Image (cartoon, rainbow, N blue to C red):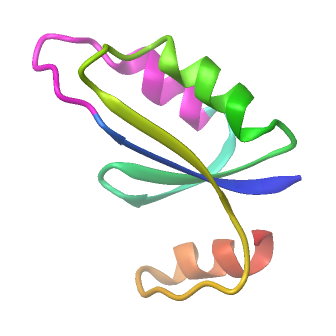
Amino acid sequence: MAALLVTYNLKSQNQDYLDFYSEIEHYFHIKLSPSSYAIYTNQPASYVYKKLRSSIEEKDSLYIIPLNKPWAGFGPRENRNWLVNYL
């Protein structure tokens, strides 16, 4: 299993992104910021990308990046604990 960073920029005002968010939230996850999640999965980054890419538009952006130690950051305790436990 691995932790992946899902970071995105959804640009369309008219697009319904519920499927996109629902797909992310199917994973064991934490929300790191308004446009990024960390997920824990046994699926490779390329597979997660393909699943999520189908729910967004061409002008949006999406990156799936493997996470590992060492890391540094500051934020809510629950996010730090998640990162400590799953990276």
**Over which residues does the magenta segment extend?**
10-25
Q: Is residue 2 left or right of residue 12?
A: right
- Name the residue rendered at 77%, 69% in the picture: 86
- Name the residue rendered at 79%, 38% in the picture: 44
Q: Is residue 7 left or right of residue 9?
A: right
- Name the residue rendered at 48%, 42% in the picture: 63
* The magenta stretch spans residue 21: yes
Answer above or below: position of 52 versus 85: above
Find residue 18 and report its image quarter: top left
Answer above or below: position of 16 versus 73: above
Rendering coords of residue 78 (x, y %): 56, 75
Task: Depth check: give the residue in front, 42 or 78.
Answer: 42
Rendering coords of residue 16 (x, y %): 27, 12
| The C terminus lies in quadrant | bottom right
Find residue 68 and report its image quarter: bottom right
- Name the residue rendered at 33%, 49% in the picture: 35
Task: Depth check: give the residue in front, 43 or 85.
Answer: 43
Answer above or below: position of 6 versus 62: below
Task: Depth check: give the residue in front, 24 or 45.
Answer: 45
